[in-house]
Image (cartoon, rainbow, N blue to C red):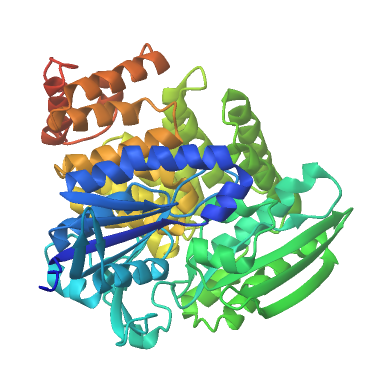
Amino acid sequence: MAEERINRRLAAILAADVVGFSRLMGADEAGTLAALKRHRETIFDPAVAAHNGRIVKLIGDGVIAEFGSVVDAVNCALSVQRSSITAPDQSASPPIIVLRIGINLGDVIIEGDDIYGDGVNIAARLEPLAETGGICISSIVNESIGNRIDVRFQDGGEISVKNIDRPIRIWKWHPGITPATARRSIAANPEPNVATASIAFLPFTNMSGDPEQEYFSDGISEDIITDLSKIAGLTVIARNSSFTYKGRSVDVRTIGRDLGVRSVLEGSIRRAGKRVRITAQLTDAATGGHLWADRYDRELTDIFEVQDDVTRRIVDALKVTLSPAEKAGLADSETSNIDAYDCVLRGRELLLGKTKNRETFEQSTKLFMRALELDPNYSQAYASLGFAYIFDYQNRWSDDPDSSLRLAKHNSEQAVEKDPNEPRARCVAALVAIFEKDLDQAKAAIDVALSLNPNFALAYNILGNIHNLSGQPLKAIPVIERAMRLDPASNPQQLHFLGMAYLLARKYETAAALLRQRILLVPETDFSRAVLASALGHLGEVDEAGRIWRELKEINPKYSFREHFGRQPFRQEDAERVTEGLAKAGLLSEPAKDNAQ
């Protein structure tokens, strides 16, 4: 009897799995299943189809997909991960779906619609080695893609894989990996997907027994994060993302994996009268072991010395080398007036809180102005006041929001005059210059901000937007991805800028996927819907573009694309590209407004 012939073929195999799926299910089973279904319908399945792939099987929260081209497989994975949040938030509603993806190229055995073999097994083993929101590929995949994709993978060294009798070299990518990072060798870094010196600073727990003192514990935490962020040799996760763990009992090893850091700092603050007690401990996120711990029991007026000491002890524990300028910067306190400092902390809490409206704008500006009455040389108070006026200009809260742009400019200039090393002031100056359509000035200001604070996620986001507006979307993409790495919780906003970058780069499918994810996370957005409708128009999906436009009009019946887009200093040809997409969908027929510089 003739031996049955085994059908084989060479294929690129993509294996994907949801990060923290069990935790998400435990917190909200129905919501998690609904979110997973939405993710598959709006992001994963369309990406596979768009890149000529085939979903072979679904295994719970996992997926195996097959591609005839390794380039298609990697581009599909990039499209999915760029469309997703990189830090799962168990408390989010709806739950946020984030994947790890592994890709291998190898022989597979075909049996009906299913596939088996080492090619599949290795892809499945690579998947858990990927960083949260990232991709891990085998060496043969990396060699095969060469320079045919728009990212570079980071060498992850050789690993042993279960049931495979040979070591496999792996390569990794994450939205936060910059081109410079990707060029580093694993030789100097045993865990290449995590920065050697990296930290997430969880908000100090308020132990004062008074919920109204929350602003104080949060403010101290934020200021230490800011001080650490100024150190070039250290990767520091931004406040927005670290604070998503506030009030939650989460193992530091989980936080380390979610945020891609090697260490986590946590502690508490108790404020009683004119005294303050702070406890702090620095933990190794890989082992859970303590690296450093201390307690401070001081007069409230000593709070600035305590902040400096905590920062220096963290730097020492992480063995980070400081430049002379960085050493000087850590010793540089902006104010010695504790009441002025208290006003700034209260104002920032209002300005950055969940509720943003005319009332919180007016309350925060009064507090910043009071801080300046107490200390007229307080640069950070001027910078914070500038941000408040920028928010008013954008949201049109006050009776005269146009005057807020002038006030933002004035306060940013005052902040720089009082302290040239205040990075927030440079960000305000950059935003003012963008709205004044002076992109050269905006770029100059943001370059200074990043030289002063190389971990400033907001500054990277602004720089990405400047590149978009300047007609350099391919430069914008890695910059915005760097912002997403440093501040995953702010990804809903960054997804819009990233989607715009891909649209301007004529990569309409990726743009549409990113903007759909933005809409899922921010259902009330109008501008992202307008840009999505343009991307769909370019793709010829006229009916879907019309549906998105109708949603936009239901959300904001008075929405005017001309007016909204006209406030952005896009180049004429880029404005025409966005308008052309809407016109192709039958949503806009008039010529594009001239936005040329």
Lateral position of residue 393 relative to residue 327, left or right: left
Residue 433 in view in this figure: no
Which quarter of the figure is the N terminus placed in?
bottom left
Task: Please state the horizontal and vertical placement of residue 441, each as a whole percent of the image.
Answer: 28, 47
Lateral position of residue 281 relative to residue 79, left or right: right
Q: Nearer the viewer, residue 191 or 238?
A: 191
Residue name at image x 16 percent, y 21 percent: 585
Q: Is residue 269 above or below residue 389?
A: below
Residue 116 in view in this figure: yes
Residue name at image x 86 percent, y 49 percent: 209
Q: Nearer the viewer, residue 366 or 33?
A: 33
Task: Please state the horizontal and vertical placement of residue 366, each as a whole percent of the image.
Answer: 65, 33
Residue name at image x 38 percent, y 67 percent: 130
Lateral position of residue 324 relative to residue 80, left or right: right
> Which of the 4 quarters of the picture holds residue 431?
top left
> Residue farthest to the top?
557
Task: Please state the horizontal and vertical placement of residue 40, each as a whole percent of the image.
Answer: 36, 42
> Residue farthest to the front?
1
Task: Please state the horizontal and vertical placement of residue 583, each as a whole percent of the image.
Answer: 13, 20
Q: Nearer the viewer, residue 155 or 209?
A: 155
Residue name at image x 74 percent, y 56 percent: 205
Total tally of numbered discs in the picture: 0
Lateral position of residue 367 relative to residue 578, left or right: right
> Residue farthest to the right?
273
Which quarter of the figure is the C terminus placed in?
top left
Q: Is residue 585 above or below residue 500?
A: above
